[in-house]
Image (cartoon, rainbow, N blue to C red):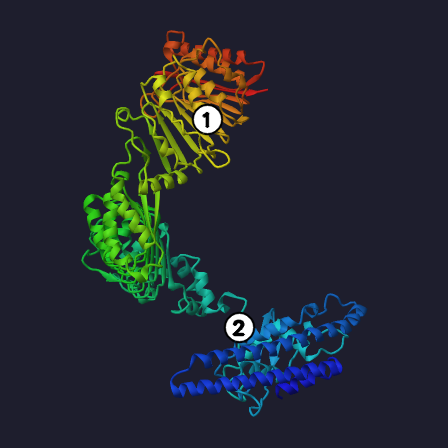
Amino acid sequence: MDTAAILAADSTGAGGQHSSTALLEAVDKLRALRSQTAHAEQLLTDAVDAQGLSGDNLALMQTSLSAAYGDAMGQLDAIAQKQGAEEGASVEPAVQQEDHSVETDTQHRQDDGLMFSLIHRASSAVPSDQPSNSTLQQSTAASTTDGKHSGVRVEDANTSAGERNTGDPVSRIFDQLGGLDWEVPDCQRRPGGPPLSRLQQLRLQLAAGGVGAGLSGSQHGGAGNTAAKEYGRPCLAGLPPGVMGHMGSFLTTIDATRRLTHLSREIHGKATDETFGIYRTLVVTEDEYDTYDKLEEEACDDTHIKWLFSETTSPSQRLGNIHAAHVRAPSVSVAVAKVLEAASDTLAELHVSGGWMAFQQDGGGKFSPRQRITFPKLAHMSIRSKAWFHHVGNRWNLPSLRSLRSVDFPFPSTAVVRVLETAPEIQQLEAAPIIFTDQEWADFPVALGKCPHITSITGLKIDFDDVGRRANQLKDALEPHWARPWRASVRKKLGFVVPRLSIGARRWEGGATTETFRWWAVAVGCHLEWRTRDNSMTIDCSSADGVSAPVLTAPDKLYGQIAAQLAAKATEVELKLGGRPVHKLVGDMLVFAHAKTLTVRVKHGVSAAAVVESIPTWLPALPGRQQPIRRFPSIERLIIWLPSLPTTDLRGFPSALSGLTGTLTSVKSVWFRGACSLALACEVLCFLPVRQLDEVTFSTPPTSHGFPGSVPPMWSRGIAQIKHIEVQRGERGGLGGDMACCRKADLLALIECAMAARPSQLTIDEVLVSADELKGEDRAAKLSDLRSFAWGCCERVRAHYTMTESKSALSQEGEFLQLSLTLVAK
């Protein structure tokens, strides 16, 4: 039965004259498609003889085939949609009348155009070289559950070869579908309903998977043969080999060996399959290192995994087909290293993480540093282990390596040079800071000269004052590769890591030496990226030698770009005061858009006047077109260091600093570290333009709590509502040094000041009180006096606060007494 007969047979029961006309039009379009296919076949045959095909003929053939195929499929879709609508209208009343809503064919209500999409998808299962006169063999797609069989059986049907074109896949698929004698599953039959049309049967078989089984089965066997092919079973042994190997990649290699290779012969065969098995991926975790070491020493009692090694010194060929390896390693295991080296011909990806242990250059006497192994297919490496990186640099040749990455692990510079010397195809070198000594840096540009394909290098640590010299040496090494005309359109990148950047009055010498490098980067199309290791930056206005130095202009050219990039990325900014302010032109390029923490540190021993004069006037905001641009729009934490500022000019410093603090609208917490004056701390809080603060912390109680005789006008603004005030156990001089102790008077003054702000909670956390401040001859008496002092503090605030915790104890140092107190607002 040819295609026209199929369509004509369907037209007799599907819609009268109108449907017959549409089907005949579809027949004509299919014949036109066969004609175009025959013409294309002739063109290709002629091209084979002539050993070439012209571009015009190829374009014409593609256009004609595409148009004919689109017309045919469009006509068939239109027929399916129309007939599906008509059949749905005629069948639906009968279904409702018999009230079989649960058993009805729910697929019937869907768009029948989906059927032809499924036919088109199924047609991809038919190979293009399958002869059109092949006999469609019997095929069964079955699902078996608890002994019940329901499925689709496709019987033999001889097809005529005289009227078909062997090169037309569309005709071939419809010829095969037309000859099928469908056996509809019982669960799909509509009880008491009318017989299903051929198109409805076809749709049901597609939904059940029968067509896929029939078409796939027709690829194997000749005419007159009957065969059955199963597509997986609902059990572990029934999974295809590819699925079994994919499952194994979610386990470590030892786990997969234990669980999948000793269940049954069938599972063992699929798990150890060379093409799809579990040994295409090596996965090793840190807790398995002892097992691998025991395998190497033949001391392993686990017979399930001991068979992985056929000899005592080398892994068996079972692990010789590894394509990807994921190793989490505290050090280099000899057994794991040998497994990887045994798979050197197939290994394409390597990912190693963990391990900061020192590595012996000879591998503990088990590796020879002179014996190098070539990995011809290893293209991608991600290593975060110093020991493994040294091992790779000492023993491996990597002729196909294209990318070497380590996100947050500093590469050992000597190993980097050795890897580059054996990796001429490398394109990307991305790492955390690669720290070079002067001697190691001298070898690095030489190694880069052997890598003509490299386009991206990031993580190069470079001192800010040494940018000009090292950057120009890098330019000389890369210019032969990047200056070629055909590399002009290739994206290139150089990333540098600068130690914590400090911008001061004398930071811009040598700018002319970097200009050559900057213009070269522009000429070759290289993007320069600058960052600091911890995303921090310092504005140094505390330099004493800068006071007598000549005024220096702002950084320009490359230095200006570096300063602007680092300021935009900085999350922590420190402002040092007490010397010469940074030039105003510097501020024109600094906006700290992502800074969350601002630390203001006053230089030890300077006068209040010197501190006020050192505050840059440009610091609060950058002039904008319509309104000023705040330099610190996202600050959430403000830290104030005031270790020894004299109290003779209390109102000068906060007022001068108010231009900056008055722009910090996002502050949530303030930390006074070593605050020398309680009055000064209160004034700083008054200038913050926020309604609420989550926390105000004092590292130690201020040693001076005398307020000025005349209250500053700004104090009338009041302090923001504070949720929590905490007094911590600080250290003398800030960080480091001896533990600082406080006086009882300092604590009382702080508590009284806190009552004016009315925080929701006040906490004194393990503050040290000197024994000289307490009454009594022995420690027990002094401890009793400290407890009485804590109760006295509670009595002062009883009207508004409740004491929830009070603790007095002898400190671990044995020289101080320790006080903890928690007051919660009523």
Crowd around label 2: few <14 · some 14–19 · many ≥20 (10 Å): few
The residue at the point 73 percent across, 65 percent down is 102
477 relative to 654 in the view: left or right: left
407 relative to 40 in the view: left or right: left
Q: Is residue 186 above or below residue 172?
A: above
Kindly indicate the quadrant of the structure image that contains residue 368. Answer: bottom left
| Depth check, front residue: 527 or 393 | 527
The residue wearing badge 2 is: 231
Say which element carries label 2.
loop
225 relative to 4 in the view: left or right: left
Kind of residue at badge 1:
Thr
| Depth check, front residue: 403 or 792 | 403
Kindly indicate the quadrant of the structure image that contains residue 766. Answer: top left
Kindly indicate the quadrant of the structure image that contains residue 468. Answer: top left
Residue 820 visible within the image = no
Q: Residue furthest front?
A: 625
Location of the C terminus (image quadrant): top right
Kind of residue at badge 2:
Tyr
Q: Position of residue 509 (x, y in %)?
A: 26, 36
Q: Position of residue 404 (x, y in %)?
A: 32, 54
Crowd around label 1: few <14 · some 14–19 · many ≥20 (10 Å): many
Q: Is residue 503 above or below residue 22?
A: above
Q: Is residue 693 above or below residue 346?
A: above
Location of the N terminus (image quadrant): bottom right
**Marks 1/2: CA–CA distance:** 72 Å
Image mark for residue 661: 1
The residue at the point 19 percent across, 55 percent down is 369
Q: Position of residue 290 (x, y in %)?
A: 32, 51
581 relative to 472 in the view: left or right: right
